[in-house]
Amino acid sequence: MAGTLFLIPAPLGDETIAWLPDAEAAKVLHIRHFVVEAEKTARKHLKALGVSTPIRELAMSTLNEHTRAEDVAALLAPLTEGEDIGLISEAGCPAVADPGAQLVALAHERGYRVEPLIGPSSILLALMASGANGQCFAFHGYLPVDAAEKAKAIKELEQRSRQRNETQVFIETPYRNNALLQQLRETLNPATRLAVACDLTLPTQTIVSRRVKDWPQDAPDFHKRPAIFIVHAG
């Protein structure tokens, strides 16, 4: 009988808290084979979950943005032998804005069982806390790096939000957060809602959601802090 691919959410920050409910954690404590985005993060998370097998005895394969597409299939090999596999992202839910999606797609194509587990998702937590429309939203990943192209993308997303009443969600490389925030405040319509959710689930968690015109001049410093940006003009 083939094994199951378990999708195991990881903490959103560098902390040793087991973010899976006990019932979910119990499903993965037996697993010996893991596909991970970052081995150090995965080992720390599994230790916090209470995995009794010595961490050094666990088999860990890496799947990240550098993994070649032709190498992904081999990562599913334990499933053919009846062994379960745990997929762990560097942070949050695997396969969501994460290279693990290609492994999940291949598992489905080959008829393996896939089981997602409950855990933290920065995208949904930010949307929940934003006050923007949670009935209709889109996640876009990163905006263009070039300032002119980024400004164009911002205006297009705002127009799309206004036309469809659709919340727009995106991220930025953390060291460019403050620059993006400034550009959003300069580019968006004053009546558009702009939310930034930063360091979610951590002691330093910061969430600001205001109409652009009402954003505080002395905004929080988001430099080098993981953040989700939300725009809603509906």
Image: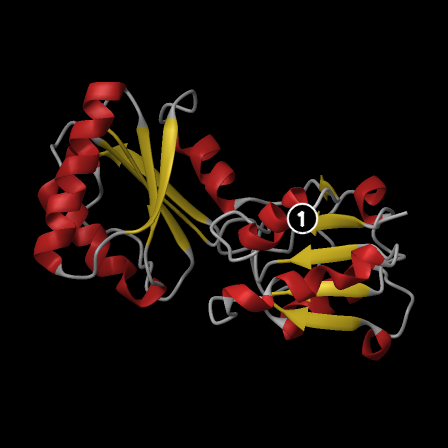
* Residue 16 visible to the viewer: no
Q: Residue at x 77, y 57 (%)?
A: 85
Residue wearing tag 1: 107
Which element type, helix, strand or loop, lies under badge 1?
Answer: helix
Q: Residue at x 35, y 63 (%)?
A: 174
* Residue 2 visible to the viewer: yes
Give neighbour class at mark 1: few <14, some 14-19, many 20+ (Cα, 10 Å). Answer: some
| Quarter where residue 130 is shown | top left
Q: Residue at x 74, y 64 (%)?
A: 34
Q: Look at the image and tell me in which quarter the C terminus lies.
A: top left
Q: Is residue 84 left or right of residue 89?
A: right
83 or 210: nearer the viewer: 83
Q: Is residue 184 above or below residue 50?
A: above
Q: Is residue 36 left or right of residue 55?
A: left
The location of residue 184, given as percent across then percent down, is 18, 46
Q: Amino acid at mark 1?
A: Ala
Q: Is residue 120 above or below residue 60?
A: above
131 or 151: nearer the viewer: 151
Q: How is the image coloured?
A: secondary structure
Q: How many marks?
A: 1
The location of residue 40, given as percent across then percent down, is 65, 74
29 or 47: nearer the viewer: 29
71 or 101: nearer the viewer: 71
The location of residue 29, given as percent across then percent down, is 87, 56
The location of residue 194, given as percent across then percent down, is 26, 37
Q: Residue at x 43, y 24 (%)?
A: 134
